Amino acid sequence: MPIATPEVYNEMLDRAKAGKFAYPAINVTSSQTLHAALRGFAEAESDGIIQISTGGAEFLGGQHNKDMVTGAVALAEFAHIVAAKYDITVALHTDHCPKDKLDGYVRPLLDISAERVARGLNPLFQSHMWDGSAETLADNLAIGQELLAKAVAAKIILEVEITPTGGEEDGVSHEINDELYTTVEDAIRTAEALGLGEKGRYLLAASFGNVHGVYKPGNVVLRPELLKDLQAGVAEKFGKASPFDFVFHGGSGSTAEEIATALENGVVKMNLDTDTQYAFTRPVVDHMFTNYAGVLKVDGEVGTKSKYDPRTWGKAAEAGMAARVVEACANLRSAGTKIK
């Protein structure tokens, strides 16, 4: 059962929260980066989450049509086949989807999974993300209610982002300022609108100074201890201890201490994209520089086929990214926790 069923995905999240660890959620853009993520999880003996952003799905759909749904479905179907060769369990997830892309991405994917469930099959994806951080909180939660109902019908978990993450990802950008911190009032309004499980399970991407991309020390002030305040504020009002399953966005370059604090306060999923992109690309650059005359037909020569064969440098790229996934599993305490 390499691709988690809805029941197993819920079990994965429950185990993470109880054990105070989180699953690395690795963004992929190709079959090769998918294999790198799967390999990393397998080598770390960790279950995990594979995710596809709108930009990643558009890229996977091919540059002729750039169809996001085609790209996402194709990779998910491919993952269902190749993941069977890895001795771990993974969930498939779609990353950031803003309002203007819902009709071309998440809503059609929800419909596909609903149709599969109606035929007695499992959903194609195990979770989808609605990124309403650019909308007012009222509009964000209203759309969240609609999507949560559709997700429940398709046996899918919804992820919601209620306040901005700084930086830029796939064309969605926010300034780095004091708005990057979710308040207890924001969390209470979220619980009032989406419930605390009785309307369907959801993951909450709250903001505690998170920023997408890479920044030098001092440019980003993370306050993961804020998550404890959000848990406590909602628990006090609704009488449910540790009510939220949190997602850590914009975590590239975070310190071990920041990650540990986030885990202690209910983070069960942490997104990795920037760091794994670099880990994939760096070995390719090294190969090209080291084998310059072989990968190029310099001064009328013919080059060296074994050096420009994509399989040669592709294997190095896969190994580099897989190693970064193993590191992430260790940092997030998921290494060695795979479901037996």
Image (cartoon, helix red, strand yellow):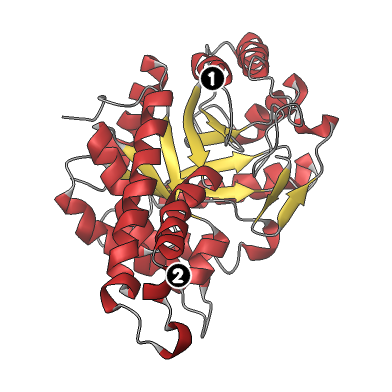
Q: What residue is at 73 percent from the left and 41 percent from the top?
A: 166
Foreground pick, 251 / 312: 312
Q: In the rendered view, tell whether residue 303 sits above or below residue 54.
A: below
Return the x and y of residue 16 as percentages of the image width and height. 38, 24
Foreground pick, 200 / 275: 275
Q: Residue 103: give its label.
A: none
Please name the residue that numbered disc 2 is placed on.
60
Q: Is residue 250 left or right of residue 318?
A: right
Q: Residues within 10 Å of mark 1 (few under 14, many from 20)?
A: some
Tag 1 and tag 2, C-beta contact below 8 Å: no
Please name the residue that numbered disc 1 is placed on.
243
Foreground pick, 244 / 94: 94
The quarter of the image holding the N terminus is top left
Return the x and y of residue 295 as percentages of the image width and height. 39, 74
Q: In the rendered view, tell whether residue 7 sits above or below residue 298.
A: above
Q: What residue is at 26 percent from the left and 48 percent from the top?
A: 3
Q: Is residue 263 visible?
A: yes
Q: In the rendered view, tell whether residue 175 sits above or below residue 154.
A: above
Quadrant location of residue 180?
Answer: top right
Gap in angstroms between the C-alphas marked 1 and 2: 36 Å
Q: Is residue 188 left or right of residue 243?
A: right
In the image, which is nearer the foreground, mark 1 or mark 2? 2
Return the x and y of residue 21 as percentages of the image width and height. 40, 21
Secondary structure beneath dot 2 equals helix
Q: Residues within 10 Å of mark 2 (few under 14, many from 20)?
A: many
The quarter of the image holding the C terminus is top left
Return the x and y of residue 153 as percentages of the image width and height. 42, 50
